Amino acid sequence: MKKSILLAAALSVGFVGTLTTFDVDPVHSNIGFKVRHLGISNVNGSFTDYVATATVDPEDLSTLKAEAVIQVASVDTGIERRDNHLRSDDFFNAEAHPTITFVSKEVRNIDGSEFELVGDLTIRETTREIILEGEFLGQATMRGKTVVAFEAEARINRFDYGLKWDALTEAGGLMVGEEVRLMLELEAAAQ
């Protein structure tokens, strides 16, 4: 009896949150990237095969934890020849390194619905800490389940992860830029 009174009191003053695990819905989500091409334009792409989860109390972003496993072979830029090159050892080497992973470690600088999610990104067995600048877009109910949505972006240097192709243009610049912009649009339903 005493425990239930303490629990009710804690809930009423906000000491105990409702942590929920959400599965990212790939039908309503996108894990994409953008990189400079010839120094003047961009190539956009995405990964179509992944599993990602987020655990969070939607009322308290400081509780956010996220994990993702992306299948490298699912890279899609709309051009089969380019996608095959991205799967090769010049870039991802999908055969030897079939997955990209992300595991969050910390949430910081929360300002309303905006936040920074710090985590470890692993590509080609190289792990580096990145900061995703994110925004919580809200929550809704669909078919009796809570659904949440997030957007986030980060910038990484592809050479840091062994994506080593460095062909030059006639003017001497990189054909494919060093910096890659990661862009996430995620909708996730409660388990």
Image (cartoon, grey):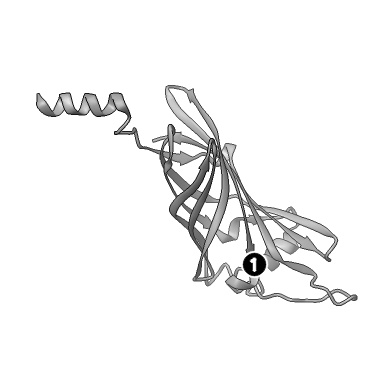
> Which residue is drawn at the image coordinates 43% and 32% (left, top)?
59
Determine whether 111 is above or below 146 in the image: below
Q: Position of residue 187 (x, y in %)?
A: 54, 37
Is 107 positioned to the left or the right of 180 in the image?
left
How many C-alpha atoms fall within 10 Å of the one at disc 1: few (<14), some, or many (≥20)? few
Image quarter of residue 34: bottom right
Q: Position of residue 15 (x, y in %)?
A: 30, 33
Q: Position of residue 133 (x, y in %)?
A: 58, 49
Image quarter of residue 105: bottom left
Determine whether 157 is above or below 59 in the image: below
Please tell me whether mark 1 sits on a helix, a strand or a loop. Answer: strand
Quick one: 75 or 144, which is closer to the camera?
A: 144
Determine whether 116 is above or below 135 in the image: below
> Which residue is drawn at the image coordinates 69% and 54% (left, top)?
45
Report the quarter where the N terminus lies: top left
Q: What residue type is labelled 1?
A: Asn
Is 126 positioned to the left or the right of 90 in the image?
left
Q: Position of residue 7 (x, y in %)?
A: 21, 28
Image quarter of residue 154: bottom right
Residue that badge 1 annotates: 157
